[in-house]
Image (cartoon, grey):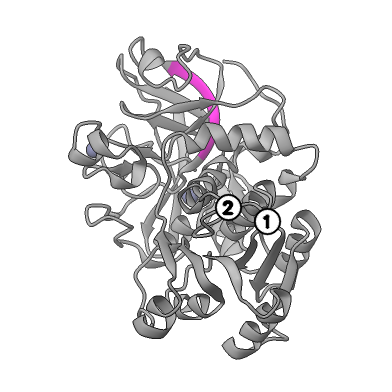
Amino acid sequence: MERIIAPVLRARRKIVTESFPNPRIGPSDALVRMIGAAICGTDKHVFQAGEIRLGLPGDVVKLPVILGHENVGVVERIGSKASKEMTTDGEQIQEGERVVISADIVCGTCYYCRNIYGYPWCLNHKSYGDVISCKDPPHLFGGMAEKLFVLPGTFLFRVPKSMSNKIAVLTEQMAVAYGAFGRAFQSPNSKDGYSPGDTVVIQGVGPLGMCNALMARMLGSSKIIAIDRSSYRLKLAKSICGAEVIDLAEHSTPKDRLDAVLSLTDGLGADTVVECTGFPHIVSEGLDLLRNGGTYIVEGAYAEGEGTKVSPSRQILAKNARIIGVSGMPYQAYSRALKMMESYRSIIPFERLVSHVFEQEDAQEAMKVSIGIDSMKVVVGRMKNEVIRNF
Ligand SMILES: [Zn+2]
Ligand SMILES: [Zn+2]
């Protein structure tokens, strides 16, 4: 019987390669042969901390877990009901199609599902690669496995035929950026949120920050300012995003960085600042970089840290600041992100965001490399050759 290889996070920082039986599926399930799972900041938080809470109170990680929720693969088997229920464009999903798999599953019936559409709000929310443990059969609930067992309630998004796997694997992260800017978006007349022509500061241009910088570019920002400590990442931000860069090596204090942002924004501060560092303590600095009436998007500080000291009077009230927390995206962000990347791919070399690809057996090394500052998007899967097979 076929065995499916999967890297399993057994303890903090400890991934073991294991194998599981090839699962059978029911009418409402699907089985996807994975092409690649891109490592997300969430995977890094879980890898380092083990059993932690992510976002909503119910979203608690229980080990063992197979990491990976930024997933692209080919549908190997799909149940008769699932082919209708998992589609997002009205057309039944067929075996052999290449798809992006939604990272999240919502119940569809709770207050939030019925009143606010979007993944982060569901009271019974589950997500692949972290909240769903691999302890119980059919085990394969993380995208780093060779195959992903797709549960009822999951949405599948068709990948455009001409899009490379390296771009498709960025969809989930780009969807987060789409959702974030979507929530910040306002009419230019009000100037009380993001609108085209704005200046945008990105705190931290790792993969999430880079997707936000690219989203800001696609949405017509007049200036993108990237702050980071990695010269490799800043170089990439400059090259593919046209970003102005602020290197922590040259601007070591918050005051230095504030001065640098002010000098790039006519002394006003940025219209929009996006936190993509993963460090809660950076939020206070981010508020200082805003112009009066500016918008602050907190997107990276997923895991609870030691917190930060904020002056509600000076940094929020006096500034009339608008603060938006982002822990996920609305459903439609996936197909929009796919369409935007497809339409901009002759102008923006999205593939350059994928800096490393590792096979399943090297997932431990992949995690280490992704945590380092000389990598961008690290992918686990068998996607070295860009061949798309049908099954
Ligand atoms: Zn992610
Ligand atoms: Zn719900």
Above or below: residue 227 compared with residue 190: below
Q: Is residue 383 visible?
A: no
Q: Are marks 1 and 2 in contact (CB under 8 Å)?
A: yes
Q: Which residue lies under the disc numbered 1?
A: 197
Residue 360: name its quadrant.
top right
Image quarter in which the C terminus is found:
top right
Tell me where the magenta segment starts and ends, as one range.
71-77
Q: Residues within 10 Å of mark 2 (few under 14, many from 20)?
A: few
Please state the horizontal and vertical placement of residue 300, each as a whole percent of the image. 47, 63
Magenta: main secondary structure equals strand
Above or below: residue 214 compared with residue 200: above
Residue at 69% x, 63% y: name it: 224
Earlier along the polypeptide chain: callout 1 or callout 2? 2
Q: 85 or 28: which is nearer to us?
A: 85
Residue 134: name its quadrant.
top left
Residue at 73% x, 38% y: name it: 344
* Amino acid found under the numbered disc labelled 1: Gly
The kind of secondary structure element at disc 2 is: loop
Disc 1 under 8 Å from ligand 1? The reply is no
* Amino acid found under the numbered disc labelled 2: Pro
Q: Which residue lies under the disc numbered 2?
A: 188
Residue at 31% x, 32% y: name it: 138
Please state the horizontal and vertical placement of residue 173, each as a whole percent of the image. 54, 48
**Closer to us: mark 1 or mark 2?**
2
The kind of secondary structure element at disc 1 is: loop
Q: Is residue 231 left or right of residue 195?
A: right
Image quarter in which the N terminus is found:
top left
Please state the horizontal and vertical placement of residue 371, each as a whole percent of the image. 56, 65
